[in-house]
Image (cartoon, grey):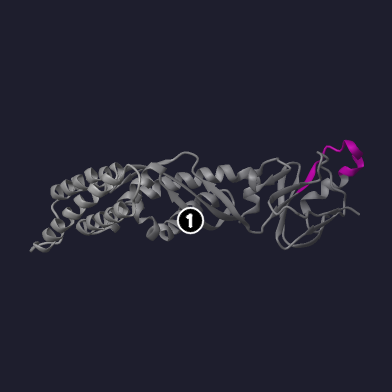
Amino acid sequence: MEVLEFLDNSGNIIVKRLPENGVLEIKWGSQLTVRESQEAVFFRDGQALDVFGPGRHVLQTQNIPAIGKWVTSFGYGPTSPFRAEVVFIGKQLFPNLKWGTREPILFRDTELNAVRLRSFGSYSIQVSDSMLFVNKVVGTRGLFSTESIQDYLKGIIVSKLNTILAKELKSVFDIAQSIENLNLIIRTEIDTDFSGLGLKIHDFYIQSISVPEEVQKLIDTRSGMGALGNMDQFMKFQVANAIGDAANNSGGSGDAFNTGAGLALGMLLPQMMNSSMNKTTSNSIEPMEKIKKLKELLELGAITQAEFDEKKVSLLKEI
């Protein structure tokens, strides 16, 4: 008695064809065992005749009427012209499949203008139509795993991602609040394409949407300027730090310079405080005035050239 069954120890085999090694003959009365997480498609002479669900099936005329002539073929022995095979299809969930953009997506951002985005995430699939999947995707292959189809599915996902990002996302600053909505929209969009292959998309997640490193640095700078708040307070803080550094430095040839810098900063601080107290309409200083004071701090060594250039660019945008 011949028993046809398939157990997948790897967990990533979608389709397995039996018998193996090109011997496409099945004995009369063979026992076909299909697990709860499987379906089996029976082929004779290259045609799909039936789909078997979970349980034990005896391959005979009682449950496959079309193979009456096939039974008599065993009189031909090893040279029988008739061919039969069973294709097992895994119906379980195939989780945590990965997708990602190989090339960055060009995105028109409302605040950063054109920017290139990269994205990656995960998704899970199930076979919804065994006959359609075998005939349209697997073909005559004897073994078909998730790795065999992942690249093709990635192409579908990335294509939909390009279109949906352009429609639904205005700026990369909105990603955090929009990501759940993007997950739902993309999952709905790719479901139609997957259904045409006999597959069902179970879940879909975007795990990250990132910008190039140089753009990220500009965003960090912008965030830092926002956190800076009142420029006048910042300059007072920088002056106080510079005075403290000058006072702590003693000994060596730099004493005279440190002492002079400390005295100059000490003279500048009361002026800044008086200027702040005399304001009547706003606590902020006009951009050009801020740049002037930053220049004075630069010359005194209270801030670095990089800090000066960074804040100068931001202040010039306010003019």
**Is residue 213 placed above or below 91 in the rendered structure?**
above
User: What is the quadrant of the N terminus in the image?
Assistant: bottom right
* Nearest the eye: 51 or 8: 8
Toward the viewer: 37 or 136? 37
Quarter occupied by residue 141? top right
Left or right of 183, for residue 40: right
Q: What type is the residue that disc 1 sits on?
A: Arg
**Magenta span includes 31:** no
Q: Is residue 169 visible?
A: no
User: Left or right of 281: which side holds 290?
Assistant: right
Residue at the location (22% across, 59% down)? 233
Residue 48 lies left or right of residue 186; in this view the side is right
Pick the front one: 305 or 11: 305
- Using the rendered view, name the quadrant where residue 35 is placed: bottom right
Image coordinates of residue 109 in percent, x first then y, are 31, 47
Residue 230: percent from left, percent from top: 22, 59
The residue sitting at the top extreme is 79
Q: Residue at x 33, y 46 (%)?
A: 218
Residue 47 vertical placement versus 129 (above, below): above
Near-viewer residue (230 or 251): 251
The residues colored magenta run: 73-86
Q: Which residue is mark 1?
A: 187
From this viewpoint, is residue 238 visible? yes
Q: Secondary structure at mark 1?
A: helix
**Residue 79 appears in which quarter of the rendering?**
top right
Q: How many other residues sit within 10 Å of disc 1, few (<14), some (14-19) or many (≥20)?
A: some
